[in-house]
Image (cartoon, rainbow, N blue to C red):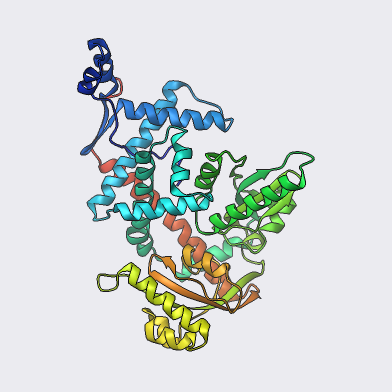
Amino acid sequence: MMVLSMSWMPAIAGLCVVAALAAGATPAAASTARAVDRIVAIINSEVITERELAVRTEAIRRRIQRDGGTLPSDEVLRDQVLEKLVNDSAQLQAARSVGISIDPVTIDRALARVAADSGRSPEEYQRGLTAEGISPEILRKELELELAMSRIRERDVDSRIQVSEAEVDAWLEEQKTAAPQLNLAQILIPLPEGASAEQQTRAAELAARIARGARSGADFGRIIASYTSAGERISGGVMGLRPIDMIPELFVQAVSGVAAGETSDVVRSPVGFHVLRVLERRGASATMAAPVRQTRARHILGRVDAVNPEPEVQRRLAEVRGRIQAGTVNFADMARQYSADGSAAQGGELGWLYAGDTVPEFESAMNALAPGEISEPVRSPFGFHLIEVLERRIDSASPDRLRAQARGVIRTRKSAEAFEEWISLARDRAFVQIRLDER
């Protein structure tokens, strides 16, 4: 989901008639304020005001114009934004109804991560958005919705998905005759013709930062919005599923061995620097056959709970890391003593890991380590980890790997379908009343 897309959430907004009169407004002006503040939609216990709709619509209009897109008519754009406001409100209320609530501290952390993806502080990031008409309240509502939907997907959707061996067999058989196809998303950092060495260096550094943010799991649309709001010249989008012979060879080579959902290294072309994400692969030769990198790693997991608050877990793991690096203890012994998961008995050993075997936060930190390096405490949905990379290798397409990848593809497809169904049900079960044309 794009934080700065048309996925908006209702926020407390609007002018007040009393305030308008107190400020010296005429009764006619106060009447205008009243009209601006009228309710245009009711969703269960929440409302959307006309002023809120106007603010969100104008922000979208600016974004489309800045990106060189084609604007629909005022009425169509307004209706599209209102539909998103209604849907997002229904989703967030549905999440709350099943006990999912995002506290302000969690939103603060999410904002810090989004800002860091764009190389800025939260304050700098927000100032850039404010210039586009996106208030702190809008941004925080967006982040609240994104976090709530992530938890819904983990707790109520993904946890219930099962993939049978018969489904794996059928999928593998289907791939034997399927033509190789790829669906890529890309971010382009363009270079002007005859770019100077300084321009090339700056673009390369920006591309590297963007790639790091993408590997941490950030949405491509959110990254584009983050950097363009800071004035950077980047663009991108989804290329769509197409045969590999209709995709630039440079791109095909760059994503060779990159699993669906993963991000490539930075690619240089005559027009600039590209960061590519594989959204989908179809066809056995495109999906399964390419050798891929495996990482053998171990970790120490510290869980956060009422007895072990976050600061204490981080402090303890940082202390353990220091002792390991000083050579006074070894990693395996510390894992057996401190790790709060089933790997403790094996000294924290996780075995050989493929891309996608671990959560994005863990995988991103692991991929950044050289063999023998130990990470700082890394946060994931499970707690905090100390990660050590032991070695890496390139693995060929073994039968076990093929079945594991097939299972992952099927699970991803089922997850997407189940999540879309959850979203549809959230809207269908909500009481929605549209008052847009009432006067």
At x 35%, y 57%, the residue is 151
Residue 181: image x %, image y %? 64, 53
Q: Is residue 160 above or below residue 38?
A: below
In front: 260, or 15? 15
Which quadrant, please, contains the C terminus? Answer: top left
At x 38%, y 48%, the residue is 143
Residue 177: image x %, image y %? 64, 59
Which residue is at the far right? 194
Kindly tell me whether residue 5 is visible in this rendering: no
Q: Is residue 217 above or below residue 57?
A: below
> In the image, 164: left or right of 100?
right
At x 43%, y 80%, the residue is 320
Kindly tell me whether residue 112 is visible in this rendering: yes
Residue 373: image x %, image y %? 57, 76
> In the image, 48: left or right of 360?
left
At x 44%, y 31%, the residue is 59
Q: How many numbered marks does the figure carry?
A: 0
Residue 24: image x %, image y %? 25, 15
In front: 434, or 287? 434
